[in-house]
């Protein structure tokens, strides 16, 4: 169930291997809360959905939840995030030393989500985002989604997802006790709309003062993803469905560019997996020499994701450098480098050359 407890070693170019020793949890709950709010990549969107890694936008901390119709806020949830699929995500953080983490926290988080579903008005999620950012959230949503088309009707979809219970509940702790793990595993594999996840973020420290954090989603099983896909609007795309959708969305030159890129990766990749997006399809070439992750993802609206942020070294750094060199896009440490069709199709041959160089170096 749990991730290994350490130590973790890093290699110093001068002194060789140095250990990070496992810390005894977090000094306060707020320390872990602030860590998650500042670095949402610790929620490991790539483990939650390997074919279309979840990307996060924080909507608020200590967000009020009403206790009933016409009532004021009775509780507060530690974090509200939303992902690029417009799925509201409720995050509750506890330290493993807190006795409530074993059972009480499950009912607590379900009650929060149920009351938010019932009593938050239309547009409440967008208002939370506006209040946090102190400005209209349109630019943040476009950056999260990667294109204007993917961001279209984002907040309407977010409200609809909340109303239908198509939400995500995440328990975060330095250690997830077995009782909480078993309940989260059961709920996640039984509930058809709501995703229930348990995430450990284990802290480590080195004598030099450096820190490390090892996040791990404990119960993101294939069985659970299949249960959700039939009812949440997400589905497993096929090649035929992808290109039918792309033909509908794109101009003939854009469609031809996507088709040409697919034919290239079909010849060079070890395999191709098809995405599960509710709004648009995607294909993800896999190269066994580079690991089990896709260096790029291509969507049926023509958007290209360069996945340098989650590829192992040295491939991740090479992809980030390529995003800068080919397209002038500064590397993102949290999310993929998102490249619109109009940008990458003019440099398609150079992009394919980058992939070939990566493959040759593997």
Image (tube, rainbow, N blue to C red):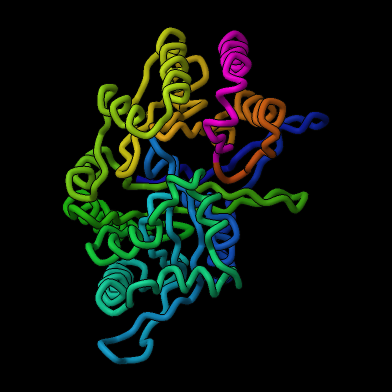
User: In the image, residue 198 lies at what x, y percent?
Assistant: 36, 55
**Relative depth, front residue between 85 and 178:** 85
> Foreground: 4 or 169?
169
Identify the residue at image location x=28%, y=41%: 221
Residue nearest the viewer, comparing 206 with 142: 142
Q: What residue do we see at 39% from left, 62% from top?
A: 155
- Which image quadrant is residue 241 in? top left
Report the residue that reaches farthest toward the right. 14
- Residue sitting farthest toward the bottom: 71
Q: Is residue 1 at all visible to an observer of this figure?
A: yes
- Total labels drawn: 0
The question of residue 359 being in magenta is answered with yes
Bounds of the magenta span? 336-362
Residue at 34% in and 54% down? 197
The quarter of the picture where residue 118 lies is bottom left
Residue 338 percent location from the top left of the image? 55, 38
Q: Is residue 270 magenta?
A: no
Q: Position of residue 70 (x, y in %)?
A: 29, 91
Q: Can you give x and y, in whole percent of width and height, for residue 293 in the image? A: 46, 27
The N terminus lies in which quarter of the figure? top left
Above/below status of 311 relative to 114: above
Magenta region, mostly helix, strand or loop? helix
**Placement of 247 over or under 99, stated as above or below:** above
Give the vertical position of 279 relative to 254 (above or below).
below
Q: Going 42% across and 23% down the picture, which residue do you hit?
A: 252
Judging depth in this view, the residue of 183 and 44 nearest the camera is: 44
In this orientation, does residue 216 appear? no
Q: Quadrant of the C terminus?
A: top right
């Amino acid at each position: 169930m749990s991730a290994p407890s350490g130590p973790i070693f890093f290699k110093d170019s001068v002194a060789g291997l140095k250990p990070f020793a496992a810390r005894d949890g977090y000094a306060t709950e707020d320390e872990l809360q602030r860590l998650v709010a500042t670095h949402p990549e610790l929620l490991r969107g790539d483990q939650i959905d390997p074919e279309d890694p979840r990307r996060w936008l924080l909507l608020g901390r200590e967000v009020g939840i009403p206790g009933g119709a016409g009532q004021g806020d009775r509780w507060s949830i530690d974090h509200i995030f939303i992902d690029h699929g417009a799925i509201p995500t409720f995050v509750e953080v506890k330290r493993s030393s807190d006795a409530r983490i074993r059972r009480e926290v499950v009912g607590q988080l379900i009650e929060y989500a149920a009351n938010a579903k019932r009593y938050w008005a239309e547009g409440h999620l967008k208002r939370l985002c506006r209040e946090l950012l102190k400005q209209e959230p349109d630019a943040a949503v476009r950056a999260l989604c990667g294109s204007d088309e993917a961001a279209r009707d984002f907040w309407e979809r977010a409200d609809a997802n909340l109303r239908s219970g198509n939400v995500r509940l995440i328990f975060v702790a330095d250690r997830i006790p077995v009782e909480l793990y078993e309940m989260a595993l059961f709920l996640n594999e039984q509930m058809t709309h709501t995703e229930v996840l348990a995430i450990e973020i284990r802290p480590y420290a080195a004598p030099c003062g450096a820190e490390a954090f090892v996040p791990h989603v404990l119960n993101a099983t294939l069985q659970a993803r299949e249960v959700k896909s039939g009812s949440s609007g997400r589905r497993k795309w096929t090649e035929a469905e992808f290109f039918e959708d792309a033909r509908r969305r794109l101009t003939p030159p854009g469609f031809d560019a996507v088709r040409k890129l697919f034919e290239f990766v079909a010849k060079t990749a070890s395999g191709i997996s098809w995405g599960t997006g509710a709004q648009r399809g995607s294909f993800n070439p896999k190269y066994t020499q580079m690991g089990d992750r896709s260096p790029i993802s291509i969507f049926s609206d023509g958007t290209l994701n360069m996945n340098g942020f989650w590829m192992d070294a040295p491939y991740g750094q090479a992809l980030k450098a390529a995003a800068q060199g080919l397209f002038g896009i500064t590397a993102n440490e949290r999310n993929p480098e998102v490249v619109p069709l109009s940008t990458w199709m003019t440099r398609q041959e150079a992009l394919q050359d980058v992939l070939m160089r990566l493959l040759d170096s593997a």
